[in-house]
Image (cartoon, rainbow, N blue to C red):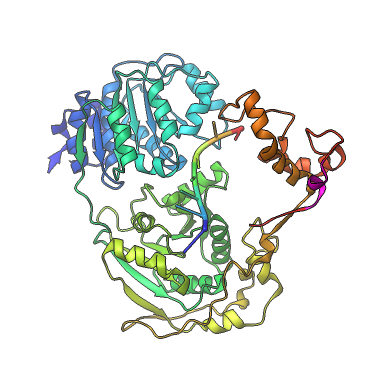
DNA sequence: AAAAAAC
């Protein structure tokens, strides 16, 4: 048990810590803070919930508080994989840099650049950033990174998953080699090891005592249902959420479209729920998360954007509406509950189609969660019941379905107070032959107006020639403007109508016949 | 089978 005052932090920083109410350092803090204060590199193998953020924020604040930033010359960078995590780090700065003159700015995408640029111009000590926006601003000449004294990389293995490693590498190279680096990752796959050997100097390796694969504070349950029909799954979910005493809970889905549908279904049935995923605009994401944190929102329906790292101290329930395809995602998801010594419960709805994924999860967690049986739901009736018109649009997993989801009418689905009882063991309920999910949507083929599709084709055809003449820049800003405007997202809609008249760009009046034919792209 | 991240 180490108390914060023993770690060598300055009185100002210690005061800020005291104000938060923390007195005892976590193992990762206890080990990393003295090393970081001494100016040495740290390689921290630790997951969220171990106090990692404070482990780098505190020494960062302490070491930077003596100097002052110049315009466009930040002194430190903290990189995080998602916008929400970056924001979380910024909150940590707000707490711990309180008594200092340090300034910081959150550089993330999805929000206007104006304030970010203004802060850079004025001079800001710490950039807390996602890689894309940081590089974007750098390329626009908004800052120099030659004055960076400390660089922090958080959740490096997740950055790897997300394909950020080249960006991280690039940012490393833009900062001076003599900088101090604090590098954190929950796991150390080879690619991450390569990065650390290339960019860290004689780092002190610190391993936070590996928390058990899943914490003992989390009780896990499996809820098997006999069909993977989305409507049946939603019914099961609502029954489950309804019978639990949910103070606040997160429902995880595998797809963004499903997140929307499930959130809507819960709302329609009177639950206080809201969706969060990467297609929602950033201010909306932030507000939803803030509401959930403050308790103003009870149920967060989320994609895996919220699976890792988010630190919400007191989540009572996690519901896995879908089984994660990657077992480690499951561990991260349920890790949103049972935090800070609190008790949590995690449920996973399992359909016959999930066998493979479930096996992987069970193998990883090395536990055998108790099985619950949802009584009182007639799954066969849901599946085979009278087909309503809007049902199909609800299942049209592509684009926005106009007429809401099958769940729009409360009476449509036999919901209600299904009772849940512990099952003796394996359950005999045989799965009615589950209609193959993907086949059930011929709508998934999309008819595309000829010129648009043609433009898409045209890229493939013309590109080699263009490339030979003048290599494109990586980031797309300087693409040949006369060719393919239409594959840029924002332009697509506009072009659809226009190109009909204009023909296909780049072909003048001589459009090959095959480009004029309607094209069907299969999903 | 997916999600995330820049305009």
Q: Is residue A74 left or right of residue A513?
A: left
Does residue A25 show up? Answer: no
Q: Residue at x 66, y 61 (%)?
A: A444
Instruction: Give coordinates of residue A165: x percent, y percent.
Output: 41, 35
Whether residue A250 is situated above or below residue A229 in the rendered picture:
above
Q: Is residue A385 left or right of residue A106?
A: right
Q: Is residue A489 left or right of residue A378?
A: right
Between A44 and A170, the residue placed more toward the observer is A170
Does residue A48 show up? Answer: yes
Quadrant into which the N terminus of chain A falls: top left
Give the magenta range: A512-518
Whether residue A327 is situated above or below residue A368 in the rendered picture:
above
Between A2 and A471, the residue placed more toward the observer is A471
Quadrant into which the C terminus of chain A falls: bottom right
**Which quadrant holds residue A349?**
bottom left
Whether residue A448 is situated above or below residue A235 in the rendered picture:
above
Instruction: Give coordinates of residue A221: x percent, y percent.
Output: 34, 70
Q: Residue at x 29, y 62 (%)?
A: A365
Furthest residue in direction top, as rendered: A70
Instruction: Give coordinates of residue A39: x percent, y percent.
Output: 22, 23
Instruction: Give coordinates of residue A456: x percent, y percent.
Output: 70, 42
In the image, is residue A517 part of the stretch drawn in magenta? yes
In the image, is residue A495 part of the stretch drawn in magenta? no
Between A227 and A134, the residue placed more toward the observer is A227
**Which quadrant holds residue A260?**
bottom right
Q: Residue at x 50, y 17 (%)?
A: A121
């Amino acid at each position: 048990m180490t108390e914060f005052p023993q770690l060598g932090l300055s009185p100002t920083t210690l005061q800020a810590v005291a104000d938060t109410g923390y007195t005892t350092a976590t193992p990762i803090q206890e080990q990393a803070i003295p090393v970081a204060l001494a100016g040495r590199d740290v390689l921290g193998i630790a997951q969220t919930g171990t106090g990692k953020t404070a482990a780098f924020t505190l020494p960062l604040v302490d070491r930077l508080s003596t100097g002052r930033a110049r315009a466009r010359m930040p002194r430190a960078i903290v990189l995080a994989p998602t916008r929400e995590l970056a924001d979380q780090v910024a909150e940590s700065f707000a707490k711990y840099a309180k008594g200092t003159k340090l300034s910081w700015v959150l550089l993330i995408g999805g929000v206007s650049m104006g304030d970010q640029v203004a802060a850079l111009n004025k001079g800001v000590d710490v950039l807390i950033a996602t890689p894309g926006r940081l590089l974007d601003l750098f390329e626009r000449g908004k800052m120099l990174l030659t004055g960076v004294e400390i660089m922090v990389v958080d959740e490096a293995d997740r950055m790897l998953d997300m394909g950020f490693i080249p960006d991280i590498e690039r940012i490393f190279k833009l900062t001076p080699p003599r900088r101090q680096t604090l590098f954190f990752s929950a796991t150390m796959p080879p690619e991450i090891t390569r990065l650390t050997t290339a960019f860290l100097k004689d780092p002190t390796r610190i391993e936070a005592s590996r928390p058990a694969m899943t914490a003992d504070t989390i009780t896990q349950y499996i809820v098997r249902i006999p069909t993977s029909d989305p409507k049946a799954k939603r019914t099961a979910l609502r029954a489950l959420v309804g019978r639990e005493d949910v103070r606040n809970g997160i429902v995880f889905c595998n797809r963004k479209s499903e997140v929307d549908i499930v959130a809507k279904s819960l709302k329609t049935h009177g639950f206080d729920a809201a969706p969060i995923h990467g297609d929602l605009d950033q201010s909306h994401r932030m507000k939803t998360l803030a509401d959930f944190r403050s308790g103003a929102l009870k149920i967060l329906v989320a994609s895996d954007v919220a699976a890792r790292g988010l630190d919400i101290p007191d989540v009572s329930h996690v519901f896995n509406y879908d089984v994660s395809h990657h077992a480690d995602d499951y561990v991260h998801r349920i890790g949103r509950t049972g935090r800070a010594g609190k008790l949590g419960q995690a449920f996973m709805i399992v359909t016959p189609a999930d066998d493979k994924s479930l096996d992987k999860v069970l193998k990883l967690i090395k536990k055998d969660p108790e099985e619950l049986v949802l009584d009182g739901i007639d799954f066969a009736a849901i599946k085979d019941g009278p087909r309503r018109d809007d049902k199909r649009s609800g299942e049209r997993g592509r684009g926005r379905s106009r007429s809401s989801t099958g769940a729009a009418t409360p009476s449509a689905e036999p919901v209600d107070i299904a009772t849940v009882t512990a099952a003796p063991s394996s359950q005999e309920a045989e799965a009615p032959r589950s209609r193959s999910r993907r086949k059930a949507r011929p709508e998934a083929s999309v008819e595309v107006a000829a010129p648009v599709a043609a433009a898409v084709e045209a890229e493939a055809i013309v590109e080699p020639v263009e490339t030979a003449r003048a290599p494109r820049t990586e980031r797309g800003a300087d693409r040949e403007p006369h060719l393919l405007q239409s594959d840029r997202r924002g332009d697509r809609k506009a072009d659809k109508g226009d190109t009909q008249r204009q023909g296909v760009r780049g072909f003048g009046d001589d459009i090959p016949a095959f480009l004029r034919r309607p094209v069907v792209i299969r999903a």
